[in-house]
């Protein structure tokens, strides 16, 4: 079934409501050092202290979704200009906790935009997530499941004739791409369909921060400029071109930071620990930012280097013991990640200044997000891919016409939603079935939950999912290949320490979540959940 675009849309609400029981709410009490206040853009803290002793029998308010359509949120239309400019800025492997160290972001996006605190990456890894941004589809529909092309489900599986850039170009937009394209872009003479201007990093130099090769409209050119600075300068040049403000445009600006990359530095774990067969990979800050966060400690939360993981049944990595040496390596990686984001912070300010100086800011929607979240030790894991909140929750902000500055929205927004949202703003027509929704009417609706299918596939090759599941407000349910499940309820266990899959006190909620997974894990178009609840 195809899905229309616009202020809408409860096409799957009847299916979801028929499965649902009753609604719940979460609280957001005062912050502490490990849980910065809402204005920093961090996910909310719930009222119960995390830990196994905080669990209690469910109350009526603990159920997953309202019954019979009760509790449905109503969309609040956003007044927007006709065919506004659209700017998507994507970071690589950024986490919510990183954002507090970016003062310009705090001013330009937290204070002057909307913090989308419920944002999620349904498949929290690079190529699948970026393909969702391009198509408005879940991974099981766009088919780019892996980060490499070894099994035919990497970049080559993406239908590049059917992407947001093509739709917008056909609607009269100039379209510009800068930075990291999904992994596998190795021939810089190729410019995918839909792009008026093309400034893409060419593999294998994408992660070389100081000597990148860029496809300049199909001509490969080598640079010796720090990649974040280079991309910032190139985007500013495009935005300042004569006549740019006369026609609508879409720009997708993709920074590589804070993803790991080279060249190696003397304090990198690979250099300091040459006998370690698997040292922690680090990124490369700009020279001026090196060692500016040398005293920064790792985030200290209850799920960091978790001791009792007997209930973690789906991810083998949770069972390992993290040595002191490994923790030292992770600390160095954390410091370098934050240092690398300082150049991004300056670039954000430069972009917004350019838009203001050229008279385009008031007609431009700017979205800032990451392809996925990231962790350096939660549940003894490193990186992304898995279903824990550190990885599926992504920093996300939006600013633009009709949006209330300095506000926080709990409405779940995913990277599947921005292609249909931008298409709706532009009056463009998608030429494929989109699974996402136009999210602007829901940002101010007071909604705080929605059924979001989540999934992941093997990183390099393989078409059988590692897991499938759903996130519904404070609930996460995931099922692995073996049929075993993990269930977390963040209203009483924010840090996801206690798997409730076998807890009889929560059997009704677990059964409901299991049924939601069955009904949504292969959804397409109008079959995918679109209802918002409050």
Image (cartoon, grey):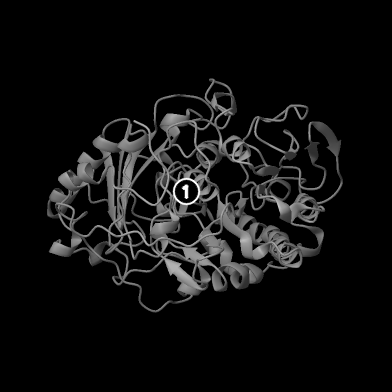
Q: Nearer the viewer, residue 308 or 216?
A: 216
Judging by the rendered image, the residue that carries numbered circle 1 is 381
**Residue 104 visible, this orientation:** yes
Q: Nearer the viewer, residue 411 or 27?
A: 411
The vertical placement of 5 against 188, above or below, is: below
Q: Position of residue 107 (x, y in %)?
A: 61, 73
Query: Which quadrant of the view contains residue 109?
Result: bottom right
Left/right placement of residue 262 relative to residue 193 reads right
The vertical placement of 411 against 416, above or below, is: below
Q: Position of residue 458 (x, y in %)?
A: 47, 31
* Number of marks: 1
The residue positioned farthest toward the bottom in the image shown: 30
Position of the N terminus, as image quadrant, is top left
**Residue 199 visible, this orientation:** no
Considering the numbered disc 1 on the image, is that residue within a helix, a strand or a loop? loop
Q: Position of residue 52 (x, y in %)?
A: 26, 61
Tell me what residue is drawn at x 33 percent, y 48 percent. Answer: 9
The residue positioned farthest toward the top in the image shown: 151
Left/right placement of residue 493 relative to residue 81 reads left
Left/right placement of residue 456 relative to residue 64 reads right
């Amino acid at each position: 079934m195809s899905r229309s675009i616009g202020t809408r849309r409860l096409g799957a609400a009847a299916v979801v409501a028929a499965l649902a029981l009753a609604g719940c709410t979460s609280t957001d009490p005062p912050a502490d050092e490990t849980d910065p206040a809402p204005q920093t853009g961090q996910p909310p803290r719930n009222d119960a202290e995390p830990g196994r002793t905080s669990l209690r029998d469910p109350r009526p308010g603990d159920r997953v979704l309202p019954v019979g359509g009760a509790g449905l949120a109503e969309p609040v239309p956003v007044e927007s200009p006709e065919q506004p400019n659209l700017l998507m800025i994507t970071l690589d492997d950024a986490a919510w906790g990183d954002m507090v160290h970016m003062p310009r972001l705090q001013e330009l996006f937290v204070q002057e935009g909307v913090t989308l605190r419920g944002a999620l990456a349904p498949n929290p890894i690079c190529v699948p997530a970026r393909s969702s941004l391009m198509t408005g589809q879940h991974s099981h529909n766009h088919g780019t499941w892996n980060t490499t092309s070894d099994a035919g489900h990497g970049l080559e599986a993406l239908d590049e004739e059917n992407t947001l850039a093509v739709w917008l170009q056909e609607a009269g937009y100039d379209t510009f791409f800068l930075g990291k394209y999904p992994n596998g872009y190795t021939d810089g003479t190729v410019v995918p369909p839909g792009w008026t201007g093309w400034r893409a990093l060419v593999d294998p130099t994408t992660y070389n921060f100081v000597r990148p090769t860029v496809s300049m409209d199909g001509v490969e050119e080598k640079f010796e400029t720090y990649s974040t600075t280079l991309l910032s300068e190139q985007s500013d040049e495009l935005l300042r071109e004569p006549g740019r403000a006369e026609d609508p445009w879409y720009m997708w600006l993709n920074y590589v930071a804070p993803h790991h990359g080279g060249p190696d530095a003397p304090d990198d774990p690979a250099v300091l620990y040459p006998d370690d067969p698997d040292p922690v990979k680090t990124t490369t800050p700009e020279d001026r930012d090196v060692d500016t966060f040398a005293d920064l400690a790792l985030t200290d939360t209850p799920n960091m280097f978790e001791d009792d993981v007997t209930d973690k049944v789906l991810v083998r990595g949770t069972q390992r013991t993290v040595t002191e040496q490994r923790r030292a390596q992770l600390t160095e990686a954390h410091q370098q990640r934050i240092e690398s984001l300082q150049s991004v912070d300056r670039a954000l300010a430069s972009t917004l200044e350019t838009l203001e100086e050229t008279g385009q800011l008031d007609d431009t929607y700017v979205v800032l997000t990451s392809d996925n979240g990231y962790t350096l030790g939660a549940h003894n894991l490193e990186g992304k891919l898995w279903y824990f909140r550190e990885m599926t929750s992504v920093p996300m902000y939006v600013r633009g016409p009709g949006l209330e500055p300095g506000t926080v929205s709990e409405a779940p927004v995913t990277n599947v939603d921005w292609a249909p949202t931008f298409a709706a703003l532009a009056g463009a027509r998608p030429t494929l079935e989109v699974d996402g929704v136009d999210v602007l009417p829901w940002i101010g609706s007071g909604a705080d939950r929605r059924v979001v299918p989540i999934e992941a596939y093997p990183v390099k090759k393989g078409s059988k999912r590692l897991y499938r599941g759903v996130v519904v407000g404070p609930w996460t349910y995931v099922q692995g290949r073996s049929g075993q499940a993990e269930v977390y309820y963040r209203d009483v266990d924010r840090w996801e320490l206690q798997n409730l899959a076998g807890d009889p006190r929560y059997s009704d909620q677990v059964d409901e979540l299991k049924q939601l997974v069955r009904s949504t894990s292969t959804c397409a178009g109008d079959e995918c959940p679109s209802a918002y609840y409050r």
